[in-house]
Image (spheres, rainbow, N blue to C red):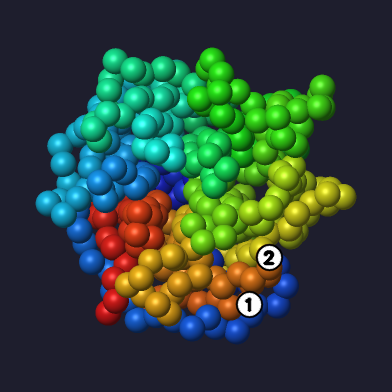
Amino acid sequence: MNARTRCSALLGTLCLVASVALSTASADEPGPPARQAAVTLTEVAEAQNPTAGAAGPGDTLWIAERGGTVRVLDGQGLSDPVLDISDETTTDGERGLLGIAFDETAAHFYVSYTDLEGTSTIDEFAVEDGAVQPDSRRTVLTQTQPYANHNGGGIAFGPDGHLYIALGDGGSGGDPHGNGQSLDTLLGKILRIDPGGGDPYAVPADNPFVDDPDARDEIWAYGLRNPWRFSFDKGTGDLLVGDVGQSDWEEIDWAPAGSTGGENYGWSSMEGTHPFRGGTEPANHVPPVHEYGRGGLGCSVTGGYVYRGEALPDLVGQYVFSDYCDGTIRTLRIEDGEVTGEGDLGVTAGEVVSFAQDDAGELYVLNIGGAIQRIDPA
């Protein structure tokens, strides 16, 4: 997430920018308030520094804990660890177990973590009868990290069945190595691979840079600073990315389901819609669908999901997200790539580090301090 001035005691050394920001300004004029559902947050479990969640077999929700454990949430509560790689990961800086995902048939389970040297690592496990098979473990992809922050770490399977991987720009501040705009590195990117199509993976033939000798074939989109959390809309297939800003602007990036990839979201020439430190806007810059500044309490956007559940009809179709520093649960209504309404749900959840979506489309809010809360009707 963002590293600058504020450190959460609960998150140890995971430092996030602490300046300011509840002023919600879209890239154009703000739209009218979205119709808001009446909601409450119901605490369903307490975890140890939860960082990510994924819908699992049998109507379960699997929860990643930063230290390296994975637990299963069901109607009986949170299980004992079903996977423990805590002796293989480090939690200094912004590191740890940062993402989990199942493939389409839940036959394989993937974890995204930083190893003891701080290298971003994606491992795969076979799943049988709803249980991870430790002996099946294999490493799919690794990426060295020059600094301990801006690891990204989110992973998800898209509607196309391919695995998408978010990696930050490598850390420090201001993108000192220019990774965001460089196509010869995986840093500062969203990647798209086929983990089952090769050893250790295959690159889909229709990835946007497969014919460019100066670019990495795995790249799907670039120009990202720290795409901490991203998701696909279960209803439309659209991609939404929460990219943590440097000093002034937090942003939500969007791509339609029919995108052929190659989007340049601007970093580090741009921060949101604004030139960064005298940068020049790239000709192919795709501006954020939404940005907000640091005029209030916010400091680090936490991307979420478009709500597709049944419990809250007034929320259907709205993108739900938050900010690590103010914890407000916010909403956007996006139509054809434009924000047509924005607001908040009138509830706060503390240090919101992630969201999770179950198979039914219901949403859960993860607080790094431990609370897992479901968004329910008030």
- Kindly indicate the quadrant of the structure image that contains residue 198: top right
Foreground of the two, 277 or 360: 360
* Element on which disc 2 rests: loop
Question: In the rendered image of this protein, does residue 263 appear above or below residue 153?
Answer: below
Position of 313 with respect to 228 (left or right) is left
Amino acid found under the numbered disc labelled 2: Gly
Q: Is residue 143 visible?
A: no
Residue 230 pos. (x, y %):
52, 49
For mark 2, what is the residue? 337
Question: In the rendered image of this protein, does residue 259 appear above or below residue 120?
Answer: below
Q: Residues within 10 Å of mark 1 (few under 14, many from 20)?
A: some
Q: Quadrant of the C terminus?
A: bottom left
Question: In the rendered image of this protein, does residue 232 appear above or below residue 62?
Answer: below
The CA distance from mark 2 to mark 1 is 9 Å
* Element on which disc 1 rests: strand
- Kindly indicate the quadrant of the structure image that contains residue 134: top left
At x 43%, y 65%, the residue is 308
At x 59%, y 30%, the residue is 193
Foreground of the two, 137 or 84: 137
Position of 124 with respect to 87 (left or right) is right
For mark 1, what is the residue? 340
